[in-house]
Image (tube, rainbow, N blue to C red):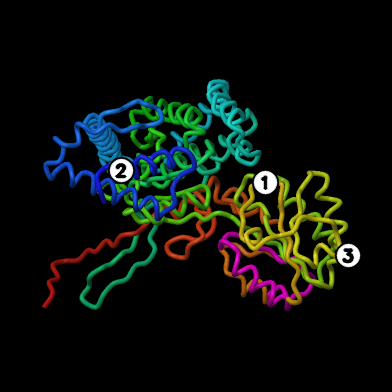
Amino acid sequence: MEIEKLINRINELYHKSQDVGLTPEELEEQKNLRQAYVANIRANLKSQLDSIDIKEKDGSITNLGEKHDAALNEQRGNDMYLETLGKNAKNAKYTIGLLDEKTRNDVLLQIADALIKENEYIIAQNKIDYDKGVSENMKAGLLDRLLLTKERIEGISEGIRQVAALEDPLNKVLDTKIMANGMHITKVSVPLGVIGIIYESRPNVTADAFSLTFKSGNVCILKGGSDAINSNLAITKVIRDVLKANNIDENAIQLIEKTDRETATEFMKMNEYVDVLIPRGSAGLIKAVVNNSTIPVIETGSGNCHIYVDKDADIDMAVNIIFNAKTQRIGVCNACESLVVHKDVREALLPKLAAKLKEKDVEIRGDKDTKEIIECVDATEEDFGKEYLDYIISVKTVDSVEEAIAHINKYNTGHSDCIITENDETAEKFLKGVDAACVYRNVSTRFTDGFEFGLGAEIGISTQKLHARGPMGLNELTSYKYKITGNGQVRG
């Protein structure tokens, strides 16, 4: 590619990344183009390029040589900044992992108190983020995720106290055996080490992530979104102040203060320092992390959660559960986004449900069989697989539980799905057949939550099958090692 075309494409991708973000394919293209650009520079073309002007919309840089130097300096700065955080975390993990249980619990209780004490400061910083979100027309569901109130901070604090009260996940003897040669092997739980977490719009994750990682002897590097930067900084400051007051390495928690996408992408490559990376947020964010990370990833998937109303369902129960799962909080991953209805109950269910959902102005997007019963918007193929995070729900009509299972397995995200039925045989078929981390019978999907599962705060809902699945609490943030003792055995 000619150098001018190369530069133009780099600029084009850059501006798109700032506006709407890039697809995984475009991210890979951007990476390759930058490498090609540097290769051109290194091939002694810089003297020719210095004379070429770049016509950027913002007019901030017009000389290519200056742009090249500025880009390299910025990259060096990013690399040094992230490397410093990585080194800090790697050093901290060896001391945090050795703290005794009482010390870890005492510090967590102090942090819980400090968050309430400093709630006015945190709420003031959160207001900056929230007002910015409103001015930028952020969706209602995302605004709900972003908002911190005194009551929500009290809830965060209570979650930390519950984590402190939980059984210590470290140094558990998971297995022990004595070999024929007298060698004694013990398998014990240990911290994972440095845990990186990338998340969006949810400042409560900052406190939740720290409480769980600290309780389990880990340290964390957090990368929140730009929309919650002031909130995250405020919560991090309160936590670090308590750590410092207890003579504990403050780098048990570090927040990446740079909010640009390039920094996030570079963070995903820090496998020299970060042991595990956990993304929390939109499907786009999670996909970007999975596609770009060189660090082992625990995938916490988005939530296209389904409720299937069987032909043997209690209709009133179904209406109440669906209303709760859809509207109690719309901006969470365990909210119901998709409804599947057995054809034999559509006439009994849909009018009642539509009237109930109208209380919250929920838009129903239904298939042709649904439209025969109630007035609604036409559902598209995309609707059946979409996590709305909004007052919208899709409806699909099916002829059998087998068809319901097939539909759900095609469109779900492996998060949480529910059947409403009084038929034990049908329920068991559904519970066995649906491929999801959490499968319910006659219960709202909103219960997929570490707090509701008795885990205290959670690090996320894992939708993968290796290492962890479902709500991830303390035990999911540990690994194990073998301790072997003997009295002089050697291998022949």
Amino acid type, label 1: Asp
| Residue 438 visible in the picture | yes
According to the image, label 2 marks what residue? 93
- Amino acid type at image mark 3: Ala
Visible residue check, residue 77: no
Q: Residues within 10 Å of mark 1 (few under 14, many from 20)?
A: many
Q: How far across and how far down the image is residue 76, in percent? A: 23, 35
On residue 390, the disc is: 1
State the residue at coordinates (84%, 60%).
350
- Is residue 424 shown in magenta? yes
Please state the horizontal and vertical placement of residue 474, each as a whole percent of the image.
Answer: 46, 51
Q: Nearer the viewer, residue 30 or 292?
A: 30
The x and y percentages for residue 275 are 32, 51
Residue where numbered disc 3 is placed = 348
Bounds of the magenta span?
401-428
Is residue 69 on the magenta stretch? no
